[in-house]
Amino acid sequence: MAENNNAYWSANIRLVTICLVIWALCSYGFAILLRPMLSGIAVGGTDLGFWFAQQGSILVFLALIFFYAWRMNKLDKEFGVDEQ
Amino acid sequence: MDQFTLNLLVVGASFALYIGIAIWARAGSTSEFYAAGQGVNPVINGMATAADWMSAASFISMAGLIAFVGYSNSTFLMGWTGGYVLMAMLLAPYLRKFGKYTVPEFVGDRYYSTSARVVAVICLLVISVTYVIGQMTGAGVAFSRFLEVTSTQGLLIASTVVFIYAVLGGMKGITYTQVAQYIVLIVAYTIPAVFISLQLTGNPIPGLGLFSTMPSTGEPLLVTLNGLLTDLGFSEYTTGNNPWLMALFTLSLMIGTAGLPHVIIRFFTVPKVADARWSAGWALVFIALLYLTAPAVGAMARLNITTTMWPNGVEGEAVAVDELPDWFQTWSVTGLLKVEDKNGDGRIQYYNEAGPGMAELAAERGWAGNELVTFNRDILVLANPEIAQLPGWVIALIAAGGLAAALSTAAGLLLAISSAISHDLVKSVFNPNITEKGELLVARISMAFAIALATWLGINPPGFAAQVVALAFGLAAATLFPTLMMGIFSKRMNAPGATLGMVAGLVVTCAYLFTYLGVFFFPGTNMLANNADNWLFGIPPTHFGPIGALINFGVAYAVSSVTAPPPKEIQDLVESVRIPRGAGAALAK
């Protein structure tokens, strides 16, 4: 039981880490610090970094939360720790 | 029907609706009062969370913040949405599994310490009380502008309405009124935005219109806007300044958002852990509907204002005084908008006097300075229906929307305050033997007390309204967020570590803010002038949240590593919080 719970927790930590790397990359990365690197990609009269700052990052946040919820609810069942 | 009657009708109808809902959803037990009986559908909770979260600042001020600064203020958009990713993955599901009613209650149980719980109550009260002042004054201002009463009268009407539905319904009443308030505010925000986007770009979705080509000029909207602004001496809309400060400020807003107790407790109301995860996603869906529209509203309003001032292009003649549109006259009365024909040519030149080369251009064209002398950024959203020439009922809807945004956030904050007093102080510290009925009564009395306090502070603001947000977010980031996160993710974290970490975060953050902004923000009591030369490592006080959080984490780990680990049953508690199974059992305890 304890072993199963530990494996479940490690899987959760792994998933959270992946999601937060994408979270940071799109907001702090593409929208702010890495914006000069993306300045070559034009979007509607400006560059991709501006789009990420005002639209893209919010859409990515949305996708991340729903992906996390879907994946975790599945993991709950796989590890047999879901609510009944 | 004149505009005033229309405003009165629409706002009155929305208030009648809120009170009707409160009577239908009144709370009969402490579980209903604190957590709506933990039976709220995750989508409904998402909608209530969106209204809880989006305050008068989001509804009225944010588009203006972006419009007059451009790219650099994208930090607000990312910061106030990205915090939900942290909340969804690091806090909400585990705190729901814990299954109690308040944030300090988790801190007290997890750190097996009444002092930790009391410190958490203090942090919660400082954060929520400062935050609620802004909501009450915001509601007062919205009232006075649309319903022709004084700010104080408006504030008293607002607190009476909140009093009725918050005291009667508790979390249950607040949840369902927040759903109604969300619908009012999002409809009010979206309708003018869609029309403006259609007029300028032909695209009905504002977020897409922002990146579309304008049929009138044949170039993308942002290119036209950049061109106009640089010609008038303003900086480019799409260009920013210091990216590191932008990143730090975004981080401060994100961590602060995730640590705000009135938002966290919304996730205690759903039936299951899985629902808490979904619900965070739904909350962001409903928030994003406004946050994806706001930057478009900002850019399009900036463009509309500029072309209104320069109807013949920047090279041509400026707008004549007697050709200014009607909404200029309406808003001049409020003092939020002011023009002054300095060079007496009967036209209003709007430009940036300090811009590069503008002094020469002004001399050449006979300008005597910028003549649009006042343009309050809050006008943008409020005057949007008039700028887009929409009918009177849309203007009335904006009034109802602004009030809905302020009232829904105020109610959520007041609940967080009153439950901390009745549940965390009275029930746990002063009178543990209090009956269920007795606690419910105390909860209602503390709610009434909190409303009275908020009203009094709203009428007599301590002169720090503008800094309040910085304090609330900075403190939430420096105190509650790290403490809650360590309580879930570290089994080794113990009572002395967490308590001292919280105290350190609280004290250092307050000290940093007070040094530059004044002791308790009273003007003139600051020790150093608030400018870049004085800031420690160049960090502005508004950006201090992440530093405070780091100090909290650092102190907590250092202290806990030299003191005894938490007892076995606490380690078991952490284990159980991490696993969804048995959430129902946790509730029964």
Image (spheres, coloured by chain):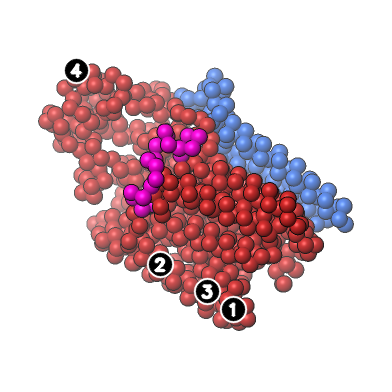
Chain colours: A blue, B red
Looking at the image, tell me whether mark 2 or mark 1 is earlier in sequence order: 1
* Three-letter code for the amino acid on which mark 1 is drawn: Asn
Q: In which chain is the residue bearing label 3? A: B
- The secondary structure type at the circle numbered 4 is helix
Residue B1 left/right relative to B255: left
* Three-letter code for the amino acid on which mark 3 is drawn: Ala
Query: Residue A68 at what x, y percent from top left?
Result: 69, 46
Looking at the image, tell me whether mark 1 or mark 3 is earlier in sequence order: 1
- The secondary structure type at the circle numbered 1 is loop
Q: Which residue is denoted by mark 4 in the rendering?
A: B364
Density class for disc 2 (Cα within 10 Å; few <14, some 14-19, many ≥20) is some
Q: Which residue is denoted by mark 2 in the rendering?
A: B453
Depth check: give the residue in front, B572 or B510. Answer: B510
Q: Which residue is denoted by mark 3 in the rendering?
A: B443
Distance Cα–Cα, label 2 vs label 4: 57 Å
Using the image, determine if residue A84 lies above or below residue B302: below
Is B410 part of what is drawn in magenta? no
Looking at the image, tell me whether mark 2 or mark 3 is earlier in sequence order: 3
Identified at 83% across, 53% down, the residue is: A5
Look at the numbered discs 3 and 4 and tell me whether their residues touch, using CB distance below 8 Å: no
Q: Which residues are magenta?
A: B521-540
Disc marking residue B9: none
Looking at the image, tell me whether mark 3 or mark 4 is earlier in sequence order: 4
Q: In which chain is the residue bearing label 1? A: B
Using the image, determine if residue A36 lies above or below residue B78: above
Q: Nearer the viewer, mark 4 or mark 1?
A: 1
Q: Nearer the viewer, mark 2 or mark 1?
A: 1
Q: Which residue is denoted by mark 1 in the rendering?
A: B431
Look at the numbered discs 1 and 3 and tell me whether their residues touch, using CB distance below 8 Å: no
Q: Nearer the viewer, mark 3 or mark 4?
A: 3
Res. B78 visible in picture:
no
Depth check: give the residue in front, B560 or B252. Answer: B560
